């Protein structure tokens, strides 16, 4: 008896390109799709920053030409602009005003904004009207808001009528600084409330029911459930507000006025230097403000761990 062996046919599969080539093709496609955006960002962001950095080292000096008697302006490169920025009282006051506005305003906005979000999240009659009323200040342009509060803080305005005093809010002093803080908090606290409200709406109601069954008080449920789950939205809101307040210009400029040392910020000083045709010093102030904003953003992200680029934890497929 002969045994006939039958060879099992090998199963053929389609050709699979290497994973590295697929990743390379995906990378090239992503680069091609992002290239127009990167080009626009390079033109409107990178080039002005590089040009301002170069201009900040240009030192201009004026002299009289002995031959013609005309004024001659000469330019050279040096660190005189930064020396003028970092030495003297003109830098310390705007630095302190900018920092104090940032710390006090953002802290007040977080407290009021979270309270607003908790109120808007509750189910009650007229909730839509309350939400619309709370969001109105945020929708008003900053310049218009400054004019409104300038009328309120007038010497014969509503604020003095309520206080029963004659406070000169637009003059030099603590009252001018306080008026800017109040106006800024009134305008931008709804922005934090809006983002926190979005975070509250994704929290399952079963968590609160389970906490209530376990005997947790509303205050403990807020600290153990609400605040941890709403933390990502709150961190992003606070970061945006920090960056916005650090570069504050229009509100104190409109509400109190220019060249008021009590409310003068770094942005206002840079604008004043540019208006007086001292472009090198203005660029130096702008670069210092740019670095200050970068340090604040980097420190905040490192401290609170804000995931702003959507970096996942899973392994690539």
Image (tube, rainbow, N blue to C red):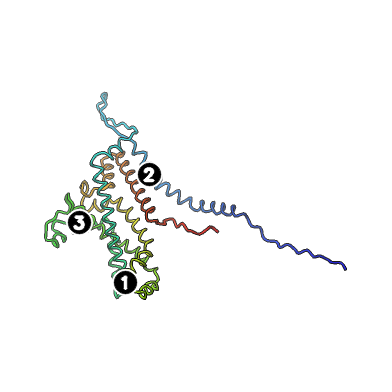
Answer whether labels 3 and 1 touch (C-beta < 8 Å).
Answer: no
Q: Nearer the viewer, residue 104 or 16?
A: 104
C-alpha distance separating marks 3 and 2 = 34 Å
Mark 3 and mark 2 lie on one chain; the one further toward the N terminus is 2
Residue 34 lies left or right of residue 272; in this view the side is right
Q: Position of residue 28 (x, y in %)?
A: 54, 51
Q: Which residue is mark 2?
A: 49
Separation of disc 2 and disc 1 at Cα?
A: 52 Å
* Residue extending furthest toward the top: 67
Say which label, 2 or 1, has the lower sequence index. Answer: 2
Out of 314 and 168, give the one closest to the viewer: 314
Query: Residue 255 at what x, y percent from top left?
Result: 22, 54
Quarter of the image with the C terminus in it = bottom right
Secondary structure under badge 2?
Answer: helix
Mark 3 and mark 1 lie on one chain; the one further toward the N terminus is 3
Name the secondary structure under disc 1.
loop
Residue drawn at (11%, 56%) of the image: 166
Q: Residues within 10 Å of mark 2 (few under 14, many from 20)?
A: some
**Residue 288 picture quarter:** top left
Q: Work out which residue is located at the far front of the displayed protein and give it.
A: 214
Q: Give the distance between the C-alpha atoms of the residues marked 3 and 1, in whole angstroms.
A: 43 Å
Q: Residue at x 47, y 51 (%)?
A: 36
Q: Secondary structure at mark 3?
A: helix
Q: Residue at x 24, y 52 (%)?
A: 252
Q: Which numbered dot is residue 150?
A: 3
Mark 3 nearby-residue class (10 Å; few <14, some 14–19, many ≥20): many
Tell me if residue 290 comes above or below residue 162 in the rendering: above
The mark closer to the camera, 3 or 1, is 1
**What is the count of numbered marks?**
3
The numbered disc on residue 280 is none
Q: Mark 1 = which residue?
A: 217
């Amino acid at each position: 008896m002969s045994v006939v062996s039958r060879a099992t046919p090998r199963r053929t599969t389609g050709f699979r390109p290497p994973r590295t080539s697929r990743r390379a093709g995906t990378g090239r496609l992503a680069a091609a799709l992002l290239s127009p955006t990167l080009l626009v960002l390079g033109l409107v962001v990178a080039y002005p920053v590089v040009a301002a950095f170069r201009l900040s080292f240009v030192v201009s000096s004026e002299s009289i030409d002995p031959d013609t008697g005309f004024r001659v302006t000469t330019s050279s490169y040096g660190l005189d602009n930064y020396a003028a920025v970092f030495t003297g009282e003109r830098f310390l006051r705007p630095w302190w005003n900018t920092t104090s506005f940032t710390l006090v305003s953002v802290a007040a906005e977080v407290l009021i904004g979270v309270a607003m979000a908790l109120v808007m999240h509750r189910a009650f009659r007229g909730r839509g009207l309350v939400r619309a009323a709370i969001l109105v200040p945020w929708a008003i342009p900053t310049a218009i808001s400054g004019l409104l509060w300038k009328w309120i803080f007038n010497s014969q305005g509503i604020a003095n009528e309520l206080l029963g005093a004659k406070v000169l809010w637009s003059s030099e002093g603590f009252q001018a600084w306080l008026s800017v803080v109040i106006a800024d908090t009134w305008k931008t606290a709804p922005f934090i409330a809006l983002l926190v409200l979005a975070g509250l709406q994704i929290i399952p109601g079963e968590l609160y029911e389970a906490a209530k069954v376990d005997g947790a008080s509303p205050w403990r449920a807020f600290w153990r459930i609400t605040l941890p789950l709403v933390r990502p939205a709150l961190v992003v809101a606070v970061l945006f507000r920090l960056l916005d307040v650090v570069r504050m210009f229009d509100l104190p400029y409109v509400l109190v006025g220019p060249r008021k040392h009590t409310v003068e910020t770094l942005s206002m000083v840079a604008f004043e230097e540019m208006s007086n045709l001292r472009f090198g010093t203005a660029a130096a102030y702008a670069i210092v403000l740019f670095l200050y904003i970068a340090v604040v953003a980097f420190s905040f992200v490192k401290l609170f761990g804000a995931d702003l680029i959507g970096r996942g934890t899973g392994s690539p497929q």
